[in-house]
Image (tube, rainbow, N blue to C red):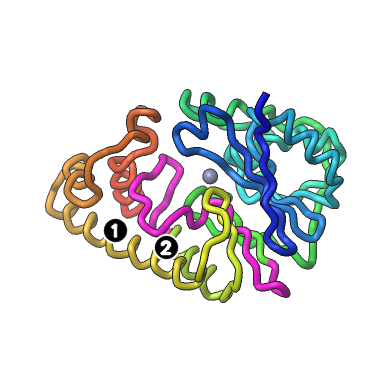
């Protein structure tokens, strides 16, 4: 069987790129990172076997988890059974212990995570700090290495113009988190789905800017009484493959609905 894990070196940072055959065919993969002997994020359940072998071979000092989504914390139970100390916010740990119900497309793409049942040793690191950056998810954190001016951004960035959203997102909060992260002036930035991001300060700023403009345009039409669907069509364009794969869960119309809900 084809290996689900590919390892790419960026000086002192190892990118652990994970995908499945189906995932690759529709452009879905996710990366964890290894830095200072610490692994940031734990991949998704469908790559559990290869990831378990990888984890056992590198013997990390600890694992930091950016947020509870199944492509980031999906192998937490596996890491716990290997005795890897786990660092995550209380909110993230609570959701890893009681995973929320997953929509079908997410179970197909990433697999269904085993809930965290094994008692864990809590992990903290002075060099790698979890910084709250809500928006993508309420429990989202980045990992900030101040000495090396490096950020492991989880799902904070993903791209400048991300026109789709899921039901847990808060676009205004995301814009604030992007600005706070840019203010750290990172020299290097690693995105869980894009890998290294060039010129991270301007990329994060550009995304915050685009979000602000898009939110204002949406608010104006909400005030004029437009429907979510009409607003999505006018401002964000036609729905794409993600809409059909997720049956609307990950979509432009959800982006608009989230702006409306957050503003209400
Ligand atoms: Zn996520």
- Residue situated in front as seen by the camera: 16 or 209: 16
Q: Position of residue 140 (x, y in %)?
A: 57, 52
The kind of secondary structure the magenta stretch mainly shows is loop
Screen quadrant of the N terminus? top right
Q: Which disc number belongs to residue 193?
A: none
- Work out whether mark 1 precedes mark 2 in sequence or the reverse, and give the earlier one: 2
- What range of the chain is rendered magenta? 145-173
Q: Can residue 16 be seen from the camera position used here? A: yes
Q: Is residue 196 magenta?
A: no
Q: Residue at x 30, y 37 (%)?
A: 240
Label 1 secondary element: helix
Q: Residue at x 73, y 36 (%)?
A: 51
- Residue situated in front as seen by the camera: 174 or 47: 47
Q: Is residue 224 above or below residue 164?
A: below
Q: Position of residue 81 (x, y in %)?
A: 84, 33
Q: Position of residue 124 (x, y in %)?
A: 79, 58
Task: Give the side of residue 167 with respect to residue 227, left or right.
Answer: right
To which quarter of the image does residue 6 belong?
top right
Q: Is residue 34 above or below residue 244?
A: below
Q: Is residue 210 above or below residue 2?
A: below
Q: Are marks 1 and 2 in contact (CB under 8 Å)?
A: yes
Q: Report which residue position mark 1 lands on.
A: 215
Label 2 secondary element: helix
Q: Report which residue position mark 2 lands on.
A: 175
Q: CA distance from mark 1 to mark 2?
A: 10 Å
Q: Is residue 71 above or below residue 101?
A: below
Q: Residue at x 48, y 64 (%)?
A: 178
Q: Can residue 89 be seen from the camera position used here? A: no
Q: Residue at x 39, y 67 (%)?
A: 206
Q: Is residue 164 magenta?
A: yes
């Amino acid at each position: 069987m084809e290996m689900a894990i590919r390892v790419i070196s960026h000086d002192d940072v190892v990118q652990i790129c994970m995908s499945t055959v189906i995932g690759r065919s529709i452009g879905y993969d996710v990366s964890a990172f290894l830095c200072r002997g610490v692994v940031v994020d734990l991949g998704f359940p469908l790559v559990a076997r290869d990831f378990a072998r990888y984890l056992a071979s590198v013997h990390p000092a600890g694992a930091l988890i950016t947020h509870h989504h199944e492509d980031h914390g999906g192998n937490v139970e596996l890491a716990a059974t290997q005795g890897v100390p786990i660092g995550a916010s209380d909110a993230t740990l609570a959701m890893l212990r009681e995973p929320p119900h997953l929509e079908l497309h997410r179970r197909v793409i990433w697999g269904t995570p085993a809930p965290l049942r094994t008692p864990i040793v809590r992990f903290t690191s002075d060099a790698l700090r979890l910084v709250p950056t809500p928006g993508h998810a309420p429990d989202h954190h980045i990992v900030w290495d101040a000495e090396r001016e490096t950020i492991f951004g989880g799902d904070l960035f993903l791209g400048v113009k991300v026109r789709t959203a899921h039901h847990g997102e808060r676009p205004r909060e995301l814009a604030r988190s992007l600005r706070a992260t840019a203010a750290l002036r990172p020299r290097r930035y690693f995105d869980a789905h894009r890998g290294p991001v060039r010129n991270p300060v301007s990329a994060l700023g550009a995304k915050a800017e685009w979000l602000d403009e898009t939110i204002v345009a949406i608010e104006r039409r909400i005030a004029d009484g437009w429907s979510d669907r009409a607003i999505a069509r006018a401002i964000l364009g036609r729905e794409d493959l993600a809409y059909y794969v997720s049956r609307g869960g990950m979509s432009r119309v959800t982006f608009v609905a989230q702006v409306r809900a957050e503003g209400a």
